Image (cartoon, rainbow, N blue to C red):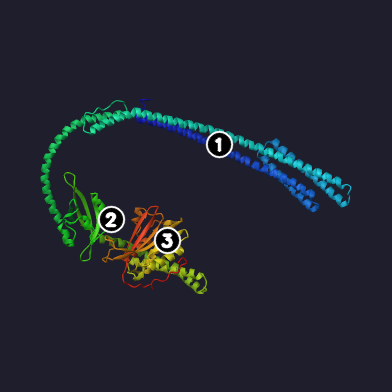
Amino acid sequence: MSKAFSSIRQRVLFAFFLLAFVGVVSSLWNIYLLAQYEQRLMQLSGESIPVLVAAYEVARQGEAISKGASGVVLTRDRWTRQAFVNRINDQFNWLDSQLATLDEKGIEQERLDHVRQNKRALQASFSDLTMAVERRHDAVLAGLNAEEPELAAEVDRLLLLHKYHADRLTYSVAGLAHARKGEIEGLVTGILKQIKVESWLLNVYALGAIIFATLVAFYLDNRVGSRVVAIQRAMRGVANGSAKEEIPRGGGDEIADMADALGTFVDKLGEREERLQIMVDERTSELGMAKNHLEINERRLRNLFEVASDWFWEADAAYAITYMSPQFFEAVGNPANVLHHSLFERMTGDDVIVEADVLEDHFQALRDRMAFSRFEFAIRMPDGRTMHLQSSGIPVFDEKGRFAGYQGALTDMTEYKLTEIEMRHAQKMQALGSLAGGVAHSFNNIFQPILILSELTLNETPENSPVRERLQITIDACRRGKALGDRILLYSRQDEPEKKPLDIHGVVNETMALFRSSAPSSIRLAENLDPEVGNVVGDAAQLEALLLNLASNSMDAIGDRSGEIQVNLSREKRVRVEYDMGGDVVHDAYAKISVSDDGCGMSPDIIERIFDPFFTTKGLGKGTGLGLSMASGIVTMHGGEIKVTSVKDQGTTFDIYLPIAEGLATDMESHPKIVSEGA
């Protein structure tokens, strides 16, 4: 046994395997027994329930026959009495069928014969009673008053005899049912006793497992714990620099092997210390020579910096810029806040364009003194152009490990960005252009008959009819559907829409009224719209399509459950670090439209692709992947930006920023009134 299980690990694993094996076998055995008990109970239930039901029906029919006999006696009309007799004969036939059912279920023959004997006696007594009643009735009709008291007494006697046999039938059936009930109770009692025994055996096994685990823990503590503590003490001494620690050895197991390895390590540690000192002396001499080479290389690199295409920069420990390649100033002129200004001050300048969250992450990396790469931002040139830059940098530390600043490089990414934008846009437009004609044509084919029939029906509908309002909603929806196809064509061609000053509050309010009329009752639409936001210059139909698309996506994200869609409209001032709209005009204020839901949310990898054409997370036939792509195009054509934030299983928020046009009068002619039941 000791040779087969020479290691502690093997012994412990074998012990726990044995314990698990016994537990699994015991559990499987109990599962098998419980299955047998359940099968027997189901079999007994299938056999006994029909027997008890049949017995109940026999008893019930016997009682009904007894009551029917009283009706035969009391009825003076012969035809009514014959109807009672016929019904009771039918009940006797029903009794025969129920007794046949009991016979098929294997009822004890003696008890079943007793029930049949009582049934035959009951049927014979009913026949005698019927004939006596008929004789009494004939005597009354013949005027034989002298014989009537004797016949009436005979009828009463036979009626009592009939009730006696009916009671006997009920008692015999009750005895049969009681016998079957006793069988069921006996079997159930036996099964419960067996379950109690098995439960006791499980408790014994659990107690044995606890005792076994305690013994294993005691063994590990005495066999393993003390030796591990001794080895740990020796290792702590070695870590503190001592090479003469006493290592406990022996035992023939893994711990002994570890102790032997540690002892060998300590023995060789002293030898290596001596060799290391020799190497340190040699390295010191080499470092002196390397220093001279470094000075030469530094001068060489400085010369390379002057002629490289990238621009190199340096900052000191206070993050102040101490060096910038001369080529940078030749390319961008002489911007302020460069040399002798901190990186933080430079990146928050008015001419710097960068997203706030990206800039905050960059600042955090600088504070943490971490290397960074591909930090992208843009600066606005004095001539109005925008230059895209990419920066990389590494922290620098002196010979004592103290932070000394940063060194990095700037790359002009303007041409690359423009090429990337043009290529991406060309790919999108090529795909959208191929589909735009077919989509618009299909939209017209779908909406044209609906629109024509709805307008004809509206003209034929009385003015005071409530149907007119619903027809008007249908007509407006069809017109907007056709306009949506036109917007797809417009987006694919990059045509500039006809823009006019619009009251953005009115656009949002009426669009949400249209959406509310089609939203299911399980979704609550909450609105917080500031009527004093101002005017924006744009196309009303495109903005309506944008909002309806976002609201529809929120409704799909909520699904069939109850949820809420929150729509907010507010006036936002331009922050110091603003988003890059790809244009040259900077506005003082923006209309911010937020569409939020508490739906399923999106993961980060999905968020990165939601604005790509034809990308959709909906099932086959439920989405084209053009909605958010078109929404992004509409916002861009209006000089704004769309942002999305989402948390998986918590919800999604789309924020739209549109420039506010101050001092322009609104023109709402191109924005017809939306008629909606929900408005």
The quarter holding residue 626 reads: bottom left
Q: Point out the tag, 3 or 2, that comes first from the N-terminus.
A: 2
Dot 1 corresponds to which residue?
37
96 versus 314 height, above or below? above
- Horizontal side, residue 176 vs residue 436: left or right: right
Q: Secondary structure at mark 1?
A: helix
Which tag is nearer the camera, tag 1 or tag 3? 3
Separation of residues labelled 3 and 2 (CA atoms)? 32 Å
Q: Earlier in the sequence, mark 1 or mark 2?
A: 1
Q: Nearer the viewer, mark 1 or mark 2?
A: 2
Q: Quadrant of residue 606?
A: bottom left
Q: Alpha-carbon neighbours of circle 2 within 10 Å: few (<14), some, or many (≥20)? A: few
Does residue 317 appear in the picture of this structure? yes
Amino acid type, mark 3: Ala
**Tally of numbered tags:** 3
Judge whether 89 appears above or below 491 on screen. Answer: above
Q: Residue at x 12, y 40 (%)?
A: 286
> At 11% across and 48% down in the image, what residue appears?
295
Q: Quadrant of the N terminus?
A: top left
Q: Position of residue 199 (x, y in %)?
A: 51, 33
Q: Nearer the viewer, residue 164 or 460?
A: 164
Under mark 1, the amino acid is Tyr
Tag 2 secondary structure: helix
* Residue with the mark numbered 3: 526
**Are dots 3 and 2 in contact, CB under 8 Å?**
no
The location of residue 370, given as percent across then percent down, is 24, 49
Q: Which mark is residue 358?
A: 2
